[in-house]
Every structure is written in C-alpha cells, then in structure tokens.
Amino acid sequence: MALTDIQVKALKPQDKKYSVSDGRGLILEVRPNGAKYWILRTWNNGKEKRRHLGSYPQLSVKDARVKAADDRDKIFSPKVNSLTLGELAKEWLGKRMTDKKPSYLESINMRLRLYILPKFENTPINEITSGDILNLCRKLEERKTLETAARVKALIGQIIRYAIATDRAENDPTVALKNTLASRQHKHMAALTKPSDIAVLIKNINAYPRIIVRCALKFSALTFCRPGEIRHAEWNEIDFENSEWRIPAEKMKMKRTHIVPLAT
C-alpha cells in the first residue's frame, strides 16, 4: 500500500527499529532515535539486497519513488547484470590507473593475467561471491605465495569497489574475507647497528675501485635515501645554495616533493 506524506510524518519511533512498505520493494525504516530512512529491497537468485536511498524528509515520498524506480532500472538492466569482471577490469585500468608508474602497472597486469582473469574474466561481477574469491586465494596459499594471495584479494576488491562507485554493483565480496587469509610472515632485513661495523663499511666503500658505484654508495650513506631515488637523482634537483636535494613529486610514491637535507 502506497504511503502518504501525512502517514510518514505520523510514524513514531519505537524501542526497536521497524519498517513500513510503500510497495515494489520500497520501505521506510524508522529508527529508535526518530530518524527515517528510505530503503530499496531487491532480490537476486533468492537473495535479498538492501540499498539505502536517503533519509526523510530530505528525500520526500515522491522523490523516493522516483529514485527507487531509477535504481531498479540500473540494477536489473541487462547491461549491468552481464558486466563481467574482465570488462570491468579493462575499464578500471583505463580510468583509474593511467597515472601510475609503469612498474606498478606491470605488476597489476601480471596478477590480472596470471591469477584473476583465468578464473573470473567472463563471470558477471554480481555473481562473484566471497567463497569464489576465497577459493582462488586458498590455491595461492597452498603454493606458499601468501603475499600474492593477499594482493590478489585486494586487487579484486579495488575493481569491484569501482563498480560500486559507478552504480553497477552493490556489494564488495572481499569485505567478508577480512582475517580469513593466512598471515604473512614479515622478516627483518639484515642491518648494521654497531658503530664499529658501520666504520668498516665506510672504509670498504672508500676503497671500492669503481668510482661511479663508490660515489653512489657514499651519497646513499649521506642522504639515507632509497637505491632507486639515488639512481634517478639529477643535478638540477640539487640546491647547493640551501644545501638540500629536492626530489620531484612525480618520482615519489605519495606524489609529494621530498626535501633531503645535504651534509656540507
């Protein structure tokens, strides 16, 4: 039975939240604090899904029906339901990954090509379940590639959340997989901690015969920067007047200029 504005205004909060129906899956949920929310209920293969449309009175009765009708069209349109993970991954790469470094893109494409697309390329995104993704990750865990399993799960989640943001999916099945994968073992890297050992290292650097490598190692010891940053350093980044090295934002992972103080 369709609700009227008078009926909606008259609904009072109770000890527990309750809902009243406007028909065709549109309901108004009334919370104990008096807040009222429009929710669209849909079913796919017998499973109920709920989509929050907005709150009343910000979203009126009439506007809630219009929004519900629009959402039904999006949810049940053949194009949305048939959108496969392979198609979505291709679009996601073209829309969201264009500004990434080539090395990062290469690793993303490798995980898609080797692990994700062979399993899900032709699978509609709304048919991919948490269990499907977990089975894929379990197979990677059996091969002792725990880091790869975690990254594959995260990558699938990124792609599906892009579909959610563009109104072509409702749920991210990777959310339910929190704490289900095997823990990755983090190893401590070898490091010199005694001043006497560091002194030996510096003496060996000073005695190294190849001048370019020797200079790079000295520069590394004086700036505490990563090897990649050392290798790609350019003279125009060095400010001798202010004794600093300004690494441009485009070279940094966080896309922010990094200023390194220089020893005299």
Image: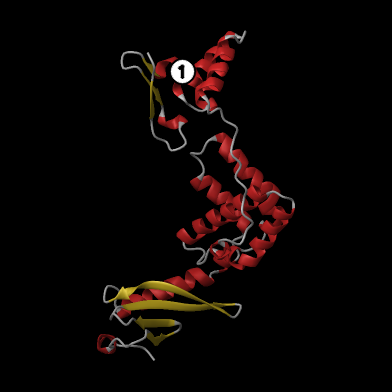
Quadrant, the C terminus: top left
Residue under the point 48% across and 72% down: 73
10 Å crowding of disc 1: few (<14), some (14-19), many (20+): few
Q: Is residue 50 left or right of residue 46?
A: left
Q: Is residue 48 above or below residue 114?
A: below
* Percent position of residue 44, x then y: 57, 76
- Specify the amino acid type for callout 1: Glu
Using the rendered view, name the quadrant where residue 181 is placed: bottom right
Q: Residue at x 53, y 13 (%)?
A: 215
Residue 31 position within the rendered picture, expressed as x and y whole percent measured from the top left: 33, 81
| Residue matched to label 1 | 234
| Number of numbered tags placed on the structure image | 1
Q: Residue at x 55, y 54 (%)?
A: 159
179 lies above or below 258: below
The x, y position of residue 180, in whole percent, is: 61, 62
Q: Is residue 129 visible?
A: no
Residue extending farthest right = 143
**In the picture shown, does residue 205 fall above or below 165?**
above
Q: Nearer the viewer, residue 232 or 41?
A: 232
Residue under the point 45% across and 19% down: 222
Instruction: Give the colour scheme shown.
Output: secondary structure
